[in-house]
Amino acid sequence: MFMIDYVTPDKAEGAVKAIYSIFPAEMPVPDPIQLFSASPRYLTKQMEIAGALMQDDAFESSLLAALRYIGASTACFGFCTEFNKGMLTSMGLTEEEINALASEPSKAFEEKDAALLSFVAKSISTPDAVNQADIDATRKAGWSDQHIFEATAYAAQMATLGIVFRTFAAK
């Protein structure tokens, strides 16, 4: 599947096995996670970041999936776009709501979360267009600077995943 060595779930040991065990048995370990096993220390750090956000009460699982979806769909990363779309569908979002996440997140999310998703969508698609008023509006909706930064960085990581994935995918 990839042109460099990586660890498949059946051969996982140590830290990589522990990370793979996070995924339920009925859900295969996502391909990008397997690719990142080429560097167990990098995989560990990436999962620590994701884990920290998942433990933050401000970020519900549906909001995190929406952030990943916005990042992946903007970065043209098909695997993660479809994966997160599936997660959002399983969480009850409709096709119309998912398709509107970047432009009208209020169709699926409450005002506070919709404000953050709108900010992140703008940040990912047109970062040079973000201005102080955008940040102030997101703060006014109830988000701290830390959360605004983390949500933006989290979504932007989908571009990194996409680049790394496409670089090492078997062609």
Image: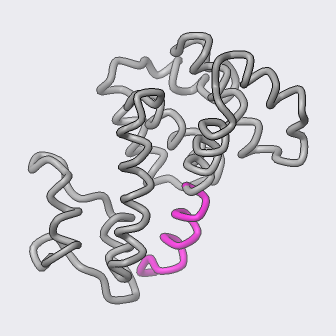
| Closer to us: 48 or 34 | 48
Quadrant in which the N terminus appears = bottom left
Q: Can residue 62 be seen in this view?
A: no
x then y, percent, for residue 169: 44, 76
| Closer to us: 86 or 134 | 134
Name the residue: 16% across, 70% down.
17
Give the prevailing secondary structure in the magenta stretch: helix
| Closer to us: 114 or 85 | 114
- Measured along the vertical axis of the image, is residue 71 above or below residue 111? below
Name the residue: 12% across, 79% down.
11
x then y, percent, for residue 167: 54, 78
x then y, percent, for residue 29: 23, 59
- Measured along the vertical axis of the image, is residue 93 above or below residue 53? above
The answer to whether residue 16 is left or right of residue 156 is left
Name the residue: 72% across, 31% down.
119
- Measured along the vertical axis of the image, is residue 60 above or below residue 15? above
Q: Is residue 51 visible?
A: yes
Quadrant housing residue 103: top right
Residue extent of the magenta highlight? 158-171
The answer to whether residue 127 is left or right of residue 120 is right
x then y, percent, for residue 26: 11, 46
